[in-house]
Each structure stands twice: as structure tokens, then as C-alpha cells.
Image: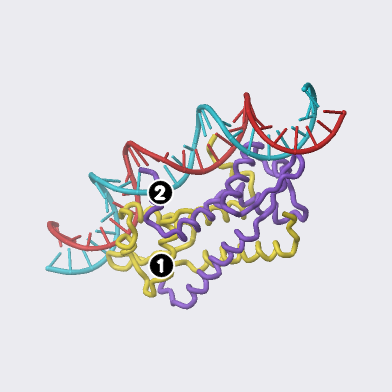
Chain colours: A purple, B yellow, C red, D cyan
Amino acid sequence: MGVTKTEHFTEAQNATALQLKALAHPARVAIMEYLCEVNSCICGDIVNELPLSQPTISQHLKELKNAGLIKGTVEGTAICYCIDENGIAQLQSYFNQFATRLHDKKQCC
Amino acid sequence: MGVTKTEHFTEAQNATALQLKALAHPARVAIMEYLCEVNSCICGDIVNELPLSQPTISQHLKELKNAGLIKGTVEGTAICYCIDENGIAQLQSYFNQFATRLHDKKQCC
DNA sequence: CTATTTTATCGTAATATTGCAATATAATTA
DNA sequence: TAATTATATTGCAATATTACGATAAAATAG
């Protein structure tokens, strides 16, 4: 055992879980917030900003990219990572809809 | 290695990551959506709704509760679990603020 | 008190994640 | 082409997560 039973859940539920999983680590939250904060599009000086090794940062960036939360474009020898507004918009929409549906129906506890 | 370096990130970043981690599994997304959908406050018939064993559901409920996303009240031999609107409000606010800050600064990619 | 019902916990196997040193790859420069 | 710079990949050890059978605990009913 120990393997998530994705086949039993809806596509949407699996997709949502994957997107949230990409943000379910403080380093990746920190990367997203840093990319959001920095005006210009910042490349691998995330490595200088965070107290993690270059391979570890690279791995976290890969996960964020796979989840559609950031995108990277080659820029000389460096790579320019920026936030993918689409991914954020999806999460924003998910929680806004959730909250709306929640207020429609009274909670009992 | 293999242990998350929480001490290097801000309290807020760690808290956000923990909350998102609680939702980073399709079963827990499904539980939240089920609790949201069901008008009355539903107890352990989540077990009947989802294709997972009772101990597994119980474990997932515990994680959601620890993260402040649901709350449970004893009701006879059963337990009534409902969504904690506070937790959802926090996540909703996080992504709304993130999106707002994002639109203020131009992205380059 | 005993049985029943409902939920939680324990123990454990299978798998996934995290982090980094070492190394590889890709683009540029000399 | 060779050296340099920036990033990615590999391999591995430590730890965490997922799932469930077995069992315990809590509340009620008889």
C-alpha cells in the first residue's frame, strides 16, 4: 500500500490536489512569493535568496513548472522563471467558488 | 536528509504550506467537496461515499482537522464533521491577495 | 453491566518526498 | 575549440505519507 488511489477520484479532484501539492512545501511557497514580489523576472538567484542548494531549488522549480504555476524561458545561459498567472487564477477561482458555495448552505457546527 | 527545513522559512510560509498540504491529496479534496455539497452536517458516512477504508478516512479527517479546515463535534456515537469556514477564508484570501499583487507588477515571460 | 455502533489509534508494508554531492548539459565567451 | 556560467539530472540516504487490518475507545441501547 502507500500509493494514492487516484483512479477513484474525479479528474478535477486529482488535478486540484496536484496543483495544491506543488504548493504544499514552504520552499515552494517562498519561491512563489519571491517571484511575485520581484518586479523584474528573476532567474536562478532564487538560489541566493533561499537557504537551499542549487539542485534542491532546481527540483522545486521543476515541480512548480509541472503544476503550471510558473513558466521558464531560456535567457542566455540563465533561465528566467516567472509566475504563470493561469495557475494562480485557477486556484483563486477554486477557493472563491468553494467559499461561495459554502455561504449558500448553512453549516451546522 | 529528507527533512523539510521549516526553520529557514517564515511562520506564514510554513503555515500556508501546511494548510495546502492538508488539501494536497485527492481524497481530502473529495472530503472537503462532499462536506461542502451536503446541506446537513454529515458524519461518518463519508466512509460510504469514498472508496477508502474507515481507518484511512479517519486519518484524512484528522489531517484536515489539524489544518483547521474542518471541525468535528460529538453527536451520540457518531461525530459530525463540517467545514471550518475560517480555514477556507484564509486560503481564499491568500490567493486573492496573491493574484492582486501579481496584477500590480508586470510579468515578463 | 453487556452488546452495539461509530470513530480513533496502532502497527506495518509500500511508496513518495526532501535534500544534496557529484556530475551532466546548454549557452556564451575568449 | 576550451573555458566559463547557469541550470538540470542522477543517485542515494533520511524521512514522510498512504493505506489498511486489527484493535481500542467512546457513546448509547437494552
Whether residue B94 is visible here, answered yes or no, is: no
Image coordinates of residue A90 in percent, x first then y, are 57, 63
Q: How dense is the environment of label 2, judged by Cα within 10 Å: few (below 14), some, or many (20 and up)?
A: few
In terms of secondary structure, where does tag 1 sit? helix
Q: Quadrant of residue D9?
A: top right
Q: Identify the amino acid type marked 1.
A: Leu
The foreground one among B7 and A56 is A56
Q: Quadrant of the C terminus of chain B?
A: bottom right
The quadrant where residue C14 appears: top left
Label 2 belongs to which residue?
A: A4
Residue A35 vs residue B72, the one in the foreground: A35
Residue under the point 77% across and 56% down: A39
Q: Vertical placement of A18 versus D30: above or below?
A: above
Residue to which mark 1 is pinned: B35
Q: Quadrant of residue B36?
A: bottom left
Expressed as whole percent of the image width and height from the top left, the position of residue D11 reads: 53, 27
Q: Residue at x 27, y 64 (%)?
A: B77
Residue at point 57%, 67% (across, down): A93
Q: Which secondary structure lies at badge 2?
A: loop
Discs 2 and 1 carry the same chain letter: no
